[in-house]
Image (tube, grey):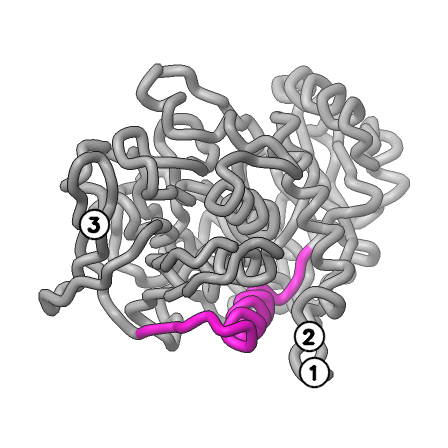
Amino acid sequence: MDNRHIVIVGGGVIGSAVAYFLAVHPRFQGRITVLERDPTYTHASSALSASSIRQQFSTALNIQMSQFGIAFLRDLHHHLSVDGELPELGLSEHGYLYLATEAGAVTLRENHEIQRAEQVDVALLNQAVLKQKFPWLNVDDLALGSLGLSGEGWFDGYALLMAFRRKARSLGVSYVQADAQDFEHDKGRVTGVRLRDGRVIKCDVAVNAAGAWARPLLAGTGFDLPVVGRKRTVFVVSSPAQTPACPLIIDPTGLWLRPEGQHWICGLPPEDDPDDAPLEADYEQFDTVWQIMANRVPAFEALRMQRAWAGYYEYHVFDQNAVIGAHPQLANLILANGFSGHGMQHAPATGRGIAELVVDGAYSSLDLSPLSAQRVLLNQPLMEKNVI
């Protein structure tokens, strides 16, 4: 049995998923400590995410991670119930709808071929079919749409985080409020995590799951992780518009929108996208958002913003894909960073994979090695085209 002490920096959905999968691994009997500087998760990306899941990616591995993710979410009661209490995510599988003008149609078709090869339940819709299926949508400038027919949608991300955390704690995982500063290491191995108050928590294995704050933790380790925090504002809007059977829509402009109860939520990547901007909603962006929404759904001309919030998008500058696996120089420091907007949906596959890597020394369920940090050092990007 494995009796090592594992310290996970970051108690968000990624860190908590790693803790859970380690705790349920049949050959792990050691200690697991999760360090989280803000147990209220006020600024945590997990708590501020729009929380959706899709299989419409451009890389097979991301598709496979989402396929495990949706299966896990569908069976969440089996995995994460505690003392008979069942977590409720409000999982809605209404699909994603990617829209493309003629300029983007080729990429949409290329992605479709990759998705169908991985058995994704997705259909390409021409302009006429889009107009028939979604009569409330303006399709005049569109050439094609890609609609997920099953296995895609949205859910309560904060509820998922809390379910992972609660289950992990019930299995003996310790959550400690602490602000990690860096990793102590000697002779090619991490020996502990140094906190800002000067204390050091010794460990046999460390996991960096610190989200948008992951890069500074590695400053003294010899690896500059190209992951930054990019602010994204989410707007909640109301309207007398009717959008029956509305999926999560990705407009060619980059704007996304989806229903949320009696309202809709939406967002748009900013033109000026600085690193680590203050975590405040960008209300000035709403005029642009409104114009795009009213163009795509004419009934949204009558629209009112109810509220807005901002969260950090853990952006991997190199290729917009996660970095998962051992640190290039420190074999017992495991990285789980840079998910570029799809960390919530890939948390189950990441947690399972890291647990296998820590305990067994290799992946057994799904090979995540293409996401290792080595590709950064070798300048061999694994580009994900479908980044929102």
Task: Label the magenta part by its dominant secondary structure.
Answer: helix
Judge by depth and name the residue closer to the eye, 338 or 270. 338
Judge by depth and name the residue closer to the eye, 142 or 23. 23
Q: Earlier in the sequence, mark 3 or mark 2?
A: 2
The residues tagged by marks 3 and 2 sit, at their Cα atoms, a distance apart of 34 Å
Relative to 126, is 87 above or below?
Answer: below
The residues tagged by marks 2 and 1 sit, at their Cα atoms, a distance apart of 5 Å
- Callout 2: few (<14), some (14-19), or many (20+) C-alpha neighbours within 10 Å? some
Image depth: mark 3 or mark 1 in front: 3
- Callout 3: few (<14), some (14-19), or many (20+) C-alpha neighbours within 10 Å? many
Answer with left or right where residue 291 lies relative to residue 140.
Answer: left
What label sits on residue 183 in the rendered view? 3
The residues tagged by marks 3 and 1 sit, at their Cα atoms, a distance apart of 37 Å
Residue with the mark numbered 2: 81
Answer with left or right where residue 258 lies relative to residue 14.
Answer: right
Q: Position of residue 195 (x, y in %)?
A: 17, 63
**Badge 2 amino acid:** Ser
Read off the magenta span: 154-176
The answer to whether the residues at label 3 and label 1 have Cβ atoms under 8 Å apart is no
What label sits on residue 85 in the rendered view? 1
Q: Position of residue 148 (x, y in %)?
A: 78, 40
Residue at image location 44% in from the left, 43% down from the top = 269
